[in-house]
Image (cartoon, rainbow, N blue to C red):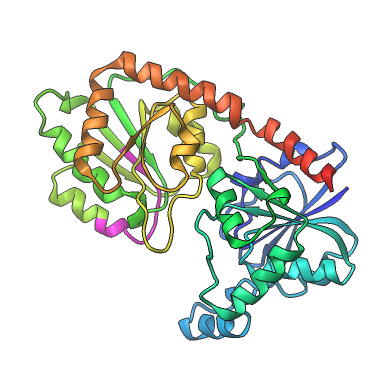
Amino acid sequence: MKIALIRGANLNEFEMQNYNPLVGKGFDLVGFTSKAPRYGLERIDFPVKKLPQLGDFSDSSKYKGFLRRFFGDDQVMVGLEKALEGFDIAHSAETFNYYTYQAIKAKLSGWVKKVVVTVWENRPLVGEDNPKQGQFKKIVLQNTDLFHAVTERAKESLILDGAPVEKIRVLPYGVDLERFRRREKDGEDIVILSVGRLVWEKGFDHILFAAKKLLQDPEVPAERLKFLIVGDGPRREILERQIQKLDLEKNVTLIRHLPYEEMPKIHASADIFLLPSLPIPSGQEQFGIVFVEAMACGKPVVAGRSGSIPEVIGEAGVLVQPGDMLSIAQALKELILDKNLRDKYGQAALERARALFDADKVASKLGSLYNEL
């Protein structure tokens, strides 16, 4: 069965680890990305084709605005429809991406047999404030053969968008449990790890505020408490200034983005994983693969109650009030002072990862979805 995995510039090895196990098992996979992919593709085990994407030609707001007015979206992959000729299934992402509409056009032209759309978005009616985007999104909803919702919340949003419920299957993604696994930790420091893009909605500012509160608490072993933040993004310089202003240089380390293969070692160095994401008008946490990676490594998780996070971590972590440094500090304090509690949540996280987020098992279920069509 020939499968085209279409993700535009967002094709990435994090998601594709759930498809790698299908190689050589009756599935011929080809990834489709742009000429300027945003992520590394080194650990993808199948061929990848790069097509020009109109949105990559310029970052000009005027140019992007023109594309959105003319097409409804700037993720237009030049020649995609014809490139899909001969495939059994075109598997795209999100109903509001133009390249998903291109997959539907390829189906209606007879070049590809079926279309599957993976949906992360957990807010209804996204994109429909743009008339052009709303128009092609309606066609996508009417002609998609199967919707793969990554969470139950994404399913509910799809239903409100008008997708037929009988065409929706819920299947979370996972990680490679051979790569992300529990390892013995060295050292006496208590390390709190945070991983993500350095943007406001991930809650890094509130991590720093909570760190300062904890270091001022006489019950907390300040000399052993370390915060490790891994990521890059537009708030990096702001966070660096905040670290200095709050006098956190000895306790907070900020590391730029690392290659994905190094992340298991980073998780092995930590005692607690923290990411207090918060919702903003333009979005909320859709899944959070970093939570799954931490859980697979047997780490207790502290997370913001945002979007689909509660669904992902279940009872295997502690949810905090988004944007509330006091709530974050209190949750961390309880875990810092009680190793048995850390071990309890860490074991629950590990068991949940093995049960729900094993990439090999996810791949098998994805294969079953394809075989439904």
Taking 101 as reference, is 263 above or below it? above
Q: Whole-percent x and y of residue 170?
A: 64, 42
Residue drawn at x 43%, y 54% is 284
Q: Is residue 300 left or right of residue 360?
A: left
Asked whether residue 272 is drawn in magenta, I would say no
Residue drawn at x 60%, y 36% is 174
Taking 210 as reference, is 234 above or below it? below
Residue drawn at x 73%, y 44% is 45
Q: Whole-percent x and y of residue 271?
A: 35, 25
Q: Whole-percent x and y of residue 133?
A: 60, 75
Q: Is residue 130 left or right of residue 2?
A: left
Q: Is residue 33 left or right of residue 46?
A: left
Q: Whole-percent x and y of residue 333?
A: 22, 27
User: Quick check: can you spot residue 249?
Assistant: no
Quadrant in the rendering for residue 157: bottom right
In front here: 147 or 29?
A: 147
The magenta-colored residue range is 228-238
Residue drawn at x 85%, y 38% is 24
Q: How many marks?
A: 0
* Residue lying farthest to the top in this orientation: 340
User: Quick check: can you spot residue 84?
Assistant: yes
Quadrant in the rendering for residue 194: top left
Taking 279 as reference, is 70 above or below it? below
Taking 111 as reference, is 251 above or below it? above
